[in-house]
Amino acid sequence: MISNPNPRYRTTENVVAGAPRVRLDAWVAEIAALTQPDRVVWCDGSDAERERLTAEMVAEGKLIALDPVKRPNSYLARTSDDDVARVESRTFICSIDEADAGPTNNWRAPSVMKQELTDLFRGSMRGRTMYVVPFAMGPDGSELTRLGVEVTDSPYVVLSMAIMTRVGARVLREIEAGTPWVATLHSVGYPLVDADGQTRDDVEWPSNEMKYIAQFPDSREIWSFGSGYGGNALLAKKCFALRIASVMARDEGWLAEHMLLIRLNSPKGRSYHVAAAFPSACGKTNLAMLKPTLPGWSVETIGDDIAWMKKGSDGRLHAINPEAGFFGVAPGTGPTSNPTAIDTVASDTIFTNVALTDDGDVWWEGLTDEPPAHLIDWRGDDWVAGSETPAAHPNSRFTVSLDNCPQLAADAHESVPIDAILFGGRRATNLPLVAQARDWTHGVFLGATISSEQTAAAEGTVGELRRDPFAMLPFCGYDMADHWSHWLDVGRELGRRAPAIFQVNWFRKGDDGGFLWPGFGENSRVLDWIIRRVEKEVAFVESPAGRLPRPGDLDLDGIDVSDDALEQLFHIDADAWLDELGLTEEFFDTFGERVHPDLRGVLRSLRYELQREARIHAARTLVESAGGSLAARESDEAAA
């Protein structure tokens, strides 16, 4: 560990004393004075640090060591019942100008929020250790890599940050050299000593009923209080890598996006790079770790969640994965849906809120076809097969290094040129299996209109569209409509070198309610067509949805997709699309005049095209009906 040079706090060594880090040292001292920890420790991300913290947490009952043979060097954490997921209602964008936050973010004036949080943080770390975690988002040497420092009182956060980011003395050296950094402050809000000096025992998962996750985009700061869970506490992830970074990207001319990154290797020996944005429960991690069923194709994983992209010296859009690990959802991840993920978490993994087996391993719904007869559930209670409650929390997670992934690209820690961008939602109706955008502006329109249909009454009205433009609705640090305009600006800058844009939908259903497309590894057949379109090896059919595959151009050899299912997968119902356009217009109207005129123009053009299609269909139906009546009358007369 690297110790704090401030002599007010107990430290073990003084490696960086005298280093020119005036702002950093002053900030750490200020936070320590506010939160009043027993000691301050500067973290280095080393194996020795990890082993020491892990041993301490196991001894305190905050981590459970899993069987070292079945799951080597892996541990289970259990949260409190009220700290299991991101808390969007308590997440704020504290821009100086309220209009910059836009209508889809919660806004609070920076001065008001800072005062409220200062009162909450005062004394919040009494009786605890305050850890200072210097971290880098992005690989060594990349011009897109950005630095941050997280102050936290959670050793779980320290261990997780060492997996998800690049922690260590190198970051401090860069800060000393003058590289800017983002200040991030976190506390679980559970002090062990009160203002009067009275002590209380710690708990397995300390947290606070009052929770705030506040981003200050203008000053590049993040303050998070009360939660110890994932994205609320690992402040490098959604808070920095998307909410703050999206503002940095807007100001500096690049893109910070909620996108996976993969390399596709074709049977011809060529490689292509794809970025893809999908909302939750739309198969994002499955695509990031895809095992193609189409012969000759392979996928190499680069990232499963976040991509930072910028125009390179060659004029193309280049991307990095700023993260160093996976923070994946466990339920639904199994040998069929994602065998690569199962291999990835075979060792060196922190599991959170999954079930514990009697032989010291982990289990969650979807890991096996049949559950074990007995488990200890995510709350620590006995669970038996057939129980009404799930054994693992639906949002249970695994945290594991990228390097654990067996199909990780050899250069996953470098930048790659992007050939295609995919947008997708979970749509049972309307959207075809795949469509190519006509141009960049149309592609931005597709990204701006990503949505998924509600599938159960518990989630809302069945069939109602849940909007998630660019899969960024909870994560964009500024007005979403301005985000779309920024994408248009980037496209103009890229010009003819811009990647092709596509929309995909693996989830369309037939009249019987069943899925029309097999999905999973068979999605490689769609990727095959996408790459052939990138190479302009095949033509297309023009439609209101965009450019569709011609009959016979999708490689369906070896899978059972009927002609009727294929027709339904690409059917465009003009009336249904017109209804949806009305909803899209209402959605655009929530952003007012900030919606770029070019996107309004795409909507108008699409409405005109669909109205024309609807008129042609109505006329054709009328003619067919009239022809049928005439034929019936002639038949009756002949019979008479």
Image (cartoon, rainbow, N blue to C red):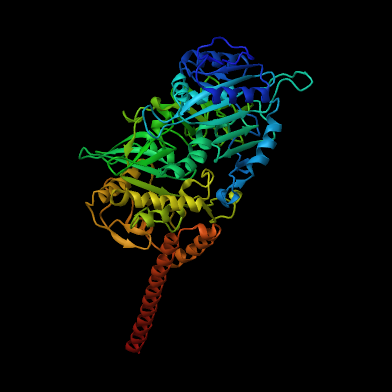
Q: Would residue 627 be visible to someone looking at this image?
A: yes
| Residue 356 is at least partly visible in this image | no
Q: Percent from the top left, x then y, of residue 349?
A: 48, 23
Total marks drawn? 0
Q: Residue drawn 47% across and 15% down?
A: 47
Q: Nearer the viewer, residue 520 or 206?
A: 206
| Vertical placement of residue 228 versus 624, above or below | above
User: Residue at the right extreme?
Assistant: 196
Residue 237 picture location, percent across and down:
50, 34
- Tell me where residue 492 appears, x and y as whole percent: 35, 52
Left or right of residue 598, residue 160 in this image: right
- Quadrant of the rendered image containing residue 152: top right
Which residue is the extreme one toward the left?
Answer: 268
Q: Quadrant of residue 213?
A: top right
Q: Nearer the viewer, residue 151 or 285?
A: 151
Left or right: where does residue 5 sit relative to residue 193?
A: left
Looking at the picture, does residue 581 appear above or below residue 270?
below
Expressed as whole percent of the image width and height from the top left, the position of residue 430 reads 43, 59
Residue located at (58% from left, 47% from top): 105
Q: Which sits in the foreground, 424 or 321?
A: 321
Q: Can you say whether 521 is above or below 124 in the image?
A: below
